[in-house]
Amino acid sequence: MLKEFKEFIARGNVLDLAVGVIIGSAFTAIVKALVDYIINPFLGLFLGSIDFSAFVIKVGSASFKVGSFLNAVINFLIIAFVVFLIVVKAVNAAMPKKEEEPAEEKVDPQVELLSEIRDLLKK
């Protein structure tokens, strides 16, 4: 079982995944800093404070921190948009576009049939 586990870990795709997760977490820290320290203050100039954490719904003794959830959703959307702009758009611009093969012209079935008859008559 240990040998099987060692083979599993030694496969390239597992190591690639591990490297991807590590780089992804480091990149997440960079993007979060960009959003927290540059984008959110810039948005704060126009929208005021973007903090809903004080919004709590209490039912009996339970407190539902809906505002904190909204903050997390807003931060996610901002981070996703920034990643889209920085990474996805940059990669799409850098990668060469695949040329589409020209579609074959559709020939009318009657014309095709007549062409076949003509070719047979020539023989």
Image (cartoon, rainbow, N blue to C red):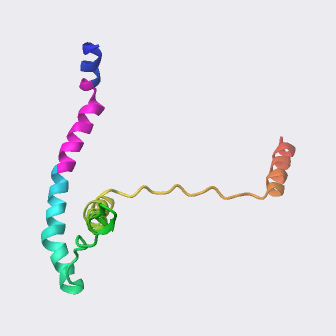
Q: Residue 52: say if magenta.
A: no
Q: Residue 22: say if magenta.
A: yes
Please give the range of residues in magenta. Answer: 9-25
Q: Which residue occupies the foreground of this view, 10 or 55?
A: 55
Q: Which quadrant would the C terminus be assigned to in this image?
A: top right
Q: Which residue occupies the foreground of this view, 116 or 96?
A: 96
Q: Which quadrant would the N terminus be assigned to in this image?
A: top left
Q: Which residue occupies the foreground of this view, 21 or 58?
A: 58
At horizontal 24% and vertical 84% (from top left) the residue drawn is: 47
Q: Quadrant of residue 60?
A: bottom left
Q: Which residue occupies the foreground of this view, 16 or 31?
A: 31
Please determine whether, in this image, residue 6 is positioned above or below residue 23.
above
| Residue at the limit of the structure toward the bottom, as seen here | 46
At horizontal 87% and vertical 45% (from top left) the residue drawn is: 121
> Could you say where residue 112 lies in the image, as x and y percent from the top left?
79, 53
| Residue at the limit of the structure toward the front, as seen here | 60
Q: As drawn, is 123 to the left or to the right of 22?
A: right
> Could you say where residue 22 lies in the image, as x and y percent from the top left?
18, 43
> Could you say where residue 88 lies in the image, as x and y percent from the top left?
31, 60
At horizontal 18% and vertical 47% (from top left) the residue drawn is: 23
At horizontal 22% and vertical 86% (from top left) the residue drawn is: 46
Q: Quadrant of residue 28?
A: bottom left
